[in-house]
Amino acid sequence: MICHIRLDRVFWSGLTVLATFAVQDARECRSQEWAEAHARGPDKGSLVICGGGILPEELRGKVAELAGGERAKIVVISTASVTADSPEIETYVAWWRKQSLAELTILHTRSRDEADRENFVEPLQRATGVWFMGGNQAWLIDTYSGTRTEMEMHKLLERGGVIGGTSAGAAVMSKLMIRRGGIQCELGRGFGFLDGAVVDQHFVRRQRTERLLNVIEQHPQLVGLGIDEGTALLVQGRKLSVLGESEVRVCFARTDTREPTVDSMRRGAEADLRVLGRIAAARRQPQGLIAAMKPQVLDGTLVIVGGNHVPAEATQRFVAAAGGKNATVTVVSLDGDDAEDGDNELMEHFRRAGAKAVQCVQVTSRKQADDPRIIASLKSAKGIWLRGDRPHKFVESCLGTVAEKICRDCLKDGGVIGGTAAGGLMHGEVLVNASPVAMKRVLVEGYDRGFGFLPGVAITSTSQPGDLPDEMTQLQREHPQVVGLGIGDSTAMIVRGHVMEVVGTNQVTVLSNHTGTDLATLSRLNAGDRYDFNDRSQLEAGK
């Protein structure tokens, strides 16, 4: 679990009311910029980045394990240490000497020419793991950057090896490196094993939060990773895992519109580096994206389902809105092969409801969402159904793509868009708790906007009839212009114009503040009930 340390007093302020076209233009622009943001570790190998101090044996042991255990061929680079040229170095490599390894080499030079020679790099060509000792990170970079030694370390990662390091050996991992100094520190080039982030070490023990925040304020596109003593961050591609005794703090910079934030990850916590990079990129964008727009569907129809079970009436209404016996339906599935059985079952329901043609396309990347073959399938459909369990997959794969635009075109042409689970939540303007990284924030930058087919609302699935999660109540307090909708399992809401109708076996809960005061109204709607978003009230039967 990641807990949140508030450095700012207000997460979100200064809301800007935008016209419909401006909101859409801004959403598409920012979605594209966020999608292009990247932060990642090595594609194949692993990094074990230790924060210094007295290291638990498990941290070096993790390097040995990932390098192959008894088959490991380890190169210890001692150049950062002041003892590298003296016999005292043996004290610091004693742990490695005691391990059962296939090969151990202590590598050191202070000559860049030597670092470029074949006989010097030859142990690295055989190595399955590298360990950087602590000391002065500038000595490591000044000696090895741009040499064959650095090149061989990158090759080691490409063949699936592991690079670990402590203190100075942690600092050199990222592309931008803290070379030395206090709050106003000197920056320089690192080895770049880790992209889109900058590392600081001895973090909690030496109170370096202000230093790292200052660095990323100068480079707000980067994620700050502060690793405390006795602790390591294991990096494997996008995946981050915390090992050891203390914590890793994830820092986001102060920007023109945001205060800095710091999130704490303790032992056992995991995060996605690409997600953190997206958050950093999103924080650089202007705020005020939540528009004070009335929830309504100007053209076409929406069928939004809570959970994965689609009520029979919702299926029938969807097919009818898509053209009845002439209906052409495309299911967009975002959960890959794991969802194949569910995709087939849903497609069969549409066929039984009378659809003329039903097909399914899988979208697991932005490339697929822009693929001409998938776009052709969407263009041919009068009804498009979005299916997936995780909102962040829709955000990362579809938001701001051609596929999203085709969905909008379908509505403009009088068609119908439907969705189950996350595919239903994405119909709203605002996403609550959609980030795959657990943070104690209602809205997480980069993961706080849905497609907005139904503007001005946030949608959540509810497990208890008539219930709403606390996060939705908090969102409504902070953004009273947003209407909160909670959809029960096996329940759907059908929206045309500014009127919503409930079908299914459970309830739809509406949380709305129509008066602009501190008082919000809660409406609980059952099957057959209708609700007018203009008046924020339930319609009488027959009207």
Image (cartoon, rainbow, N blue to C red):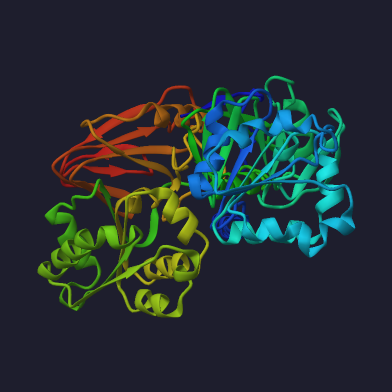
Q: Is residue 16 left or right of residue 378?
A: right
Residue 251's quadrant in the figure? top right
Residue at 67% of width from left, 52% of height from top? Answer: 193
Residue at 17% of width from left, 78% of height from top? Answer: 356
Q: Position of residue 155 (x, y in %)?
A: 65, 61
Q: Is residue 101 left or right of residue 80?
A: left
Compared with 434, 424 (above or below) is below
Residue farthest left in this picture:
352
Is residue 298 at all visible to an observer of this figure? yes
Q: Position of residue 450 (x, y in %)?
A: 45, 51
**Along the viewing direction, whichever of 525 and 475 lies nearer the viewer:** 475
Is residue 17 at all visible to an observer of this figure? no
Q: Is residue 70 left or right of residue 204?
A: left
Compared with 130, 61 (above or below) is above
**Along the viewing direction, whichever of 394 and 506 lies nearer the viewer:** 394
Residue 418's quadrant in the figure? bottom left
